[in-house]
Image (spheres, rainbow, N blue to C red):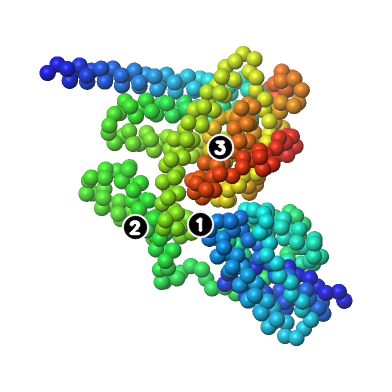
Amino acid sequence: MIEPIALQSTLETVRFWAIVLCLGLGVFFTLVSTVGVLRLPDIYARAHTASQTDTLGAGFALAGVALAFGWQHAAVYTVLLLFFVFITNPTAAHAIARSAAESDVEPVLAEEGEADDAEVAAETEGETR
Amino acid sequence: MAAERVLVPLSDTVTVRQTVAYAVQSGLETADSLECHLVIALPYDVDLPEGKRMSDGAEELLERAENWVEEDADGADVTIETAVLGTDEYLFGPRDYAEIFRAYADDHGIDRLVLDPEYSPGVTASMLQPLERELDRVGMSYDEAPVERAARHGRLVLSHTGFDRLFATFWISFGFYLVLGDPFYWFDLLTGAAVAGIVSVSLAHVTFSMPLDRVQSPLRAVRFVFYIPYLLWEIVKANIAVSAVILRPSMPIEPTLTRVNARVRSGLPLLALANSITLTPGTLTVRANDQQLLVHTLIPSAREDLFDGGLEKAIRFVFYGRESAAIPSPNERDDAEIVGGDEL
């Protein structure tokens, strides 16, 4: 009875690399999101990319966790966790954008001339706030 | 003295009779003759199968109200005009109602609007407060009829809808408890039933914002399950597009502020739509005034997706069924536009 063991060990390897892939993608999207928060001009644009962390960043990380847990009850919790993240993340992003709009933060828009100028203007503005 | 003209929006409530009486009485106090405009504003879902019943009910209510006015006028000089509004447009939120009343008032030289405190057109919950706010906004003077009403809670007999609510709340909370606990352990089953019982008795009447339907509500839940993979796929696509833009050294972003008039009902459907829009990177709901969503978009492709209304169609599919999903995109029906920053 050698074959079943071999099959099981290949499955284990596949699972291992699937976990690694999920965590890697999660880290990648979180990194992109961080880069985005640093590079983008104003609070509205940054809110877009901040939600990337929560959607795909947390999504892939939690998928990796669920895979690592395997077929047990704790894996259900990670799905639930993701569900709640998906409800709270847009709510928070909307709250931030809305309060920015209410405190009269002007968005940097594409029509406002050169993108570079707008970026610089927004950066200095962001610092004074 | 010129005739006083009052506008009375009617809906099938327990206080509509008293509202009409108040309108006639207060109108005759200030002027010798009264022109009483009784109107019924039909909600947007009048196109749906149950809409026919609703518009028949409207005619019937208008006839009844006409008799009431004649009864209350008691020989005084009262002219009655009736109208059904909203047959050729979609009325969604309080803003639409306020605007259609305003337009009617302008056309007919109305002096005053008498509002039923329980006014609730269609199946939606009472919308007195938002309607008052919107009426203020469009600059329409109104009067809330002082009515006596029976307390709405504390009824001992469990009604048909009350049972449905209890039933649904019980099973939702019981199911959630078992997801957290162990569904095969007798202790969890027992405590779960106890907790779900307490939750359903104490919270059932605030859990659902719209009446439950024994066929439609479970169907909505099933359709929502189909919506989740679609949403996830949209999120992945949008994430990759936004990541590519951010990582490119030139960073070709094109931030715009857009306004989209969504054709979904206020409350849960609108919340689901606005949340889904925000959840996909590249589009961010900044403001939601009733059905007017102010959306900030980061890249052109995300904006085009938004204007094509894929998510809106999906939300309509979840809440209203497959036929309702096939509506023109916001772009085609002229409900989407790029606006300047001063719109905030």
Which residue is tagged 1? B210
Q: CA distance from mark 3 to mark 2?
A: 40 Å
- Between tags 3 and 2, which lies in front? 3
Question: Measured along the vertical axis of the image, is residue A117 above or below residue B159?
Answer: above
Residue sitting at x 55%, y 56%? B48
SS at badge 3: helix
Which residue is tagged 3? B310
Q: Chain of mark 3?
A: B
Q: CA distance from mark 1 to mark 3?
A: 25 Å
Query: Mark 3 is on which residue type?
Result: Gly
Q: Of the residues under marks 2 and 1, which one precedes in the sequence?
A: 2
Question: Measured along the vertical axis of the image, is residue A79 above or below residue B54?
Answer: above
SS at badge 2: helix
Q: Of the residues under marks 3 and 2, which one precedes in the sequence?
A: 2
Quick check: B147 left or right of B35? left
In the picture, the disc for residue B197 is 2
